[in-house]
Amino acid sequence: MSQMPPLAIVILAAGKGTRMKSDLPKVMHELAGLPMINWLLQTTEKLNPDKIIVVTGKDMDELRTACAPHETVIQEKQQGTGSALMAAMPALAGFDGDIMVLLGDTPFISVDTLESLRSSRHSAKDIGLSVLGVTLEQPTGYGRLLVDKKGFLSAIREEKDASDDERQIKEVNTGAFCLDATKTNEWLNSLTNKNAQGEYYITDIPEIAGKDGFKTAIALIKDMQEAQGCNTRYDLSQLEKTAQNILRKKHIENGVTLQDPDTVYFRHDTKIGANTIIEPNVYFGPEVTVNENVHIKAFCHFEKCSIGAGTTIGPFARLRPGSDIGEDVRIGNFVEVKKSTIGRGSKISHLSYVGDTEMGENVNFGCGAITVNYDGFNKFTTKIKDNVMIGSNANLVAPVTIEKGAFIAAGSTITKDVSEDALSLTRPEQRTIKDWAKNNRKKKKK
Ligand code: UD1
Ligand code: CA
């Protein structure tokens, strides 16, 4: 598309989203942890436009911050999608090219589709604009496309203004337009609000352009998920499913094995290296990095942590914020790690809590052993150097340091530092009384 004129993109996002019953602007609701508006911004950035302008309402500072560095304008009164585009026009004064208008509540439109919308606007000389349509089995709620004999769009009829016959039409408006910038102001000035909702509809433009001698081309979406909009919280839940499917597909294409993709939940920012295997029912919270060749067994939960190459985690493991797990580590079932670094080759195989800990390499942290990091007021650090062996069910009461190669006997409660290669244990000596149990049973029988 080398001869294409300059491109400006306007995203309409001033609507309060009343049907969401929310304090947040609609487009600030998150999908896989990223606000809806940012999904759309990421896509539009890939088109390399000259400008991206987001139309917001008053009192939407949070939204304006989320859009930065892109320009935002305020639509003072929410009088419809046409008036929203009018609010952006001063920011486009003197702009000569294509204006692509997108709806902020339709986040999964693809780069390819937007390019086809744009090329259909340039497919013949007398085309003044193009509209992105989709065919829906359930078109209720959408503006219907009225098509002339030559396949051009003669008008868009909003649901509330449509006749019974027009409501049967299944080709609908997705809300995306590509308009000739030099004509747009003139067409907008011809809009009226004489319709069922008393609003200025951007969807009246095709009819107005027609009277002006310009045709409206239709580009059709092939993949339904791209047309998915958000008006209610139910719609939001359906968009979340789509976001998850997009992310699952991305990781699979990058060489990650998902044994049951539908049960693994990602964040938009999850990073996973190739050849990693993820079993069913795994949840990724924010800021998780997993390196190559990791094996994540079923039912794990991760937040703000990193996992080194070759490591095995789970089943049923929880890595909390600040966990930095090294290479070739083994974290087994019912293990919780928080704000700790675990060195290469160390093993925490069963039923442990490790918090505020610096653990060296090749440490064996026995079954049921824990760090005691909190005294009810403050958190303290535990340091475990290379090649230490921590016996089962030991309590390491922080602050405490276990030097290299030391051995902590099972069941010990360690409150003082342990020197290199030493054995440390805190338990009464074992006493065995011969035949005590047998005699006890005899006594009970009498
Ligand atoms: C709109 C279209 C409809 C289309 C549907 C696709 C119009 C009149 N109707 O209907 O043809 O099938 O989208 O989803 O365009 N907005 C503003 N300012 C306003 C009003 C809306 O910025 O004054 C923004 C909203 O924030 C939203 C978008 O425009 O992101 C669409 O508005 P909405 O009220 O949801 O339109 P629909 O009724 O869905
Ligand atoms: Ca909508």
Image (tube, rainbow, N blue to C red):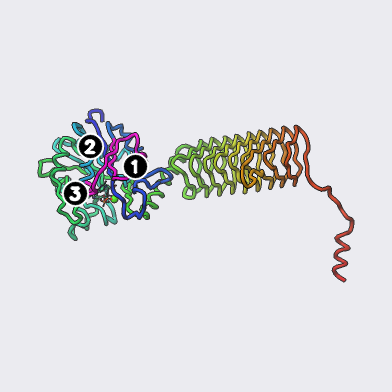
Q: Which residue is mark 1?
A: 61
On whether ligand 1 comes within 8 Å of the CB at mark 2, the answer is no
Choose between 361 and 398: the one closer to the eye: 398
Q: Position of residue 150 (x, y in %)?
A: 15, 45
| Bounds of the magenta segment | 52-81
Q: Position of residue 387 (x, y in %)?
A: 71, 34
Q: Residue at x 49, y 47 (%)?
A: 264
Q: Residue at x 78, y 35 (%)?
A: 422
Q: Which residue is mark 3?
A: 200
For marks 3 and 1, give the CA distance: 25 Å
Q: Nearer the viewer, mark 1 or mark 2?
A: 1
Say whether marks 3 and 1 touch (CB < 8 Å): no
Q: Residue at x 75, y 45 (%)?
A: 412
Q: Which residue is mark 2?
A: 99
On whether ligand 1 comes within 8 Å of the CB at mark 3, the answer is yes
Residue furthest to the bottom in view is: 446
Q: Amino acid at mark 3?
A: Tyr
Q: Does the magenta-highlighted stretch encompass residue 63?
A: yes
Left/right placement of residue 178 relative to residue 272 reads left
User: Image quadrant for the C terminus?
Assistant: bottom right
